Amino acid sequence: MNTVLQLPTATFFQLPFLNTTQDVLINFIISESLKKDHSDPLVIFTPNPEQVVLTQKQPSFLVTLQKADVLLPDGQGIVWASQWLKGNGESIQERIAGVDVVKALLDQLPKTTRVLLVGGQNYHLLQYKEHQIRWEPTYQDVKNPQPEEETQLQKIIQEFQPDLVFVAFGAPYQEEWVIAHLGLLKKSGLKLVMVVGGAFDVLLGKVPRAPLFIQHLGLEWLYRLIQQPWRWRRQLRLIEFIGLVGKQLLDSFFFTRVHTK
């Protein structure tokens, strides 16, 4: 992976979140990462409060997230938590949603850019604006990939030689897939690999995006819950996330009191 990145971070919950604006990130990707010949693709993960909670239950997932080059603060809760906790003395500037980064990249990159989407459902003849995107569902069950599926995927990547790969298995499977397949992606000359979850469902209009004022209020999670009530179990992790933040605040408070006596 890339070892030198001129992008600031702020660390919370042992994760170095990107601490700049989306415009700065997009400019960096287009002017630096995608134009330079380098041996390693830029790896972008998009942790949100749900995933932070998951790292507490699955330490291996924390290690996986830490292997990314860029961790987007994909959730208003991450920004609020940083403002309360002030990790490294500096809070995160703004939320950067994965779906917005994908949209910005596809809006600005030339239509000749070879884009591959791995995972997701029902994306046949996938096209977004001028981009004809190759979609590969890849696995019948991402939890139990078959040897023949891996062989077919390897053949597709070697022949297509994508510039960008978006991975849509959902966490933690998409992040684990990226790290496990970095060697294969590196050999193909890939420039960037990014996990996207259900971003293309939103971009293609399958799932409506919350209005901007709801996004700005930090209530996009509630809007999605209304649209997709089956997500209610996942949203319980938001309560756990608040508990994690509260615990860190208390720990910091007592630590400060002990060391100031």
Image (cartoon, rainbow, N blue to C red):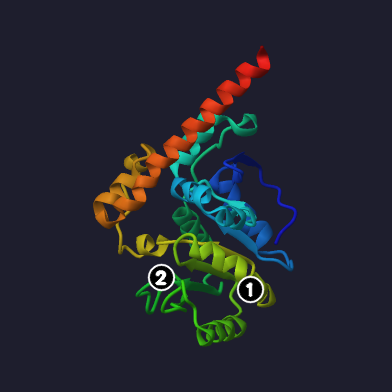
Question: Sequence-wise, which precedes: disc 2 or disc 1?
Answer: 2
Q: Is residue 202 above or below residue 86?
A: below
Q: Quadrant of the N terminus?
A: bottom right
Nearer the observer, 235 or 56: 56
Q: Where's residue 149, x and y in %?
A: 50, 84
Instruction: Answer with the quarter of the image where residue 182 lies.
Output: bottom right
Q: Where's residue 4, x and y in %?
A: 75, 53
Nearer the observer, 146 or 134: 146
- Image point 39% across, 43% down: which residue? 238
* 112 left or right of 228 in image: right
- Can residue 109 be seen? no
- Can residue 193 be seen? yes
Type of the residue with mark 2:
Gly
Q: Which mark is residue 185?
A: 1
Nearer the observer, 241 or 93: 241
Q: Where's residue 213, x and y in %?
A: 33, 40
Alpha-carbon distance for marks 2 and 1?
19 Å
- Image point 51% across, 74% down: which residue? 116
Residue carrying label 2: 120
- Image point 53% across, 32% down: which residue? 248
Q: Quadrant of the C terminus?
A: top right
How busy is the neighbourhood of tag 1: few (under 14 within 10 Å), some, or many (20 plus)?
many
Q: Is residue 250 above or below residue 177?
A: above
Q: Secondary structure at mark 2?
A: loop
State how many labels appear. Answer: 2
Q: Where's residue 257, x and y in %?
A: 61, 16
Q: Is residue 146 above or below residue 12?
A: below
